[in-house]
């Protein structure tokens, strides 16, 4: 088999794997909201306030998405503070990432920073409330 043929086969395999991995990532994506009105008032909700330029935000994002599968009674939402300043102002966000925990439209807690243990404790508290 020629080198050119081997490269074409390898390219096909890489593209196939890339597509599969991309679909897995898209499957785990948490819904991004841009308007305050998109926040449900009759559910348990966690909001992840993040910025694209924030390193800790990028680090915690895949872990946050995985948690969505573990806490099925809680709606997970993301808010980009640069694109949705109004929402960030309403919740007085001062640091990224900040996670805000809401039950029936009322804030019951928050976690500043990418501390996974604190986020899980807050999610367990919200789930049990």
Image (cartoon, helix red, strand yellow):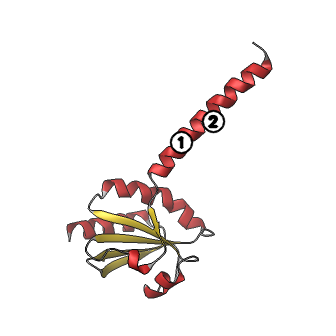
* Vertical relation: 115 (above or below) 90: above
Q: How crowded is mark 1: few (under 14 residues within 10 Å), some or many (20 or more)?
A: few
Residue behind mark 1: 21
Classify mark 2: helix, strand or loop: helix
Where residue 90 appears, as percent x and y from the top left, is 44, 87
Where residue 114 appears, as percent x and y from the top left, is 48, 67
Residue closest to the eye, 126 or 13: 13
Quarter of the figure with the C terminus: bottom left
Residue closest to the eye, 5 or 70: 5
Residue at coordinates 63% horizontally, 36% vertically from top-left? 15
Residue at coordinates 25% horizontally, 77% vertically from top-left? 104
**Mark 1 vs 2: CB contact within 8 A:** no
Q: How far apart are marks 1 and 2 (CA)?
A: 10 Å
Classify mark 1: helix, strand or loop: helix
* Vertical relation: 92 (above or below) 45: below
Where residue 77 appears, as percent x and y from the top left, is 41, 67
Residue closest to the eye, 128 or 21: 21
Q: Residues within 10 Å of mark 2 (few under 14, many from 20)?
A: few
Quick one: which residue is furthest to the right in this view?
A: 3
In the picture provided, is 93 more to the left or to the right than 5?
Answer: left
Residue at coordinates 39% horizontally, 74% vertically from top-left? 38
Give the number of the disc on residue 15: 2
């Amino acid at each position: 088999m020629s080198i050119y043929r081997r490269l074409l086969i390898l390219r096909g395999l890489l593209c196939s794997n890339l597509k599969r991995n991309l679909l897995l990532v898209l499957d785990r994506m948490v819904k991004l909201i841009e308007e305050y009105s998109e926040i449900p008032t009759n559910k348990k909700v966690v909001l992840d306030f993040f910025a694209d330029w924030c390193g800790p935000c990028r680090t915690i994002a895949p872990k946050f998405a995985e948690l969505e599968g573990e806490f099925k009674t809680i709606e997970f939402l993301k808010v980009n503070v640069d694109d949705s300043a109004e929402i960030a102002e309403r919740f007085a966000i001062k640091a990224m990432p900040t996670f805000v925990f809401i039950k029936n439209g009322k804030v019951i807690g928050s976690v500043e920073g990418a501390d996974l243990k604190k986020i899980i404790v807050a999610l367990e508290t919200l789930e049990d409330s």
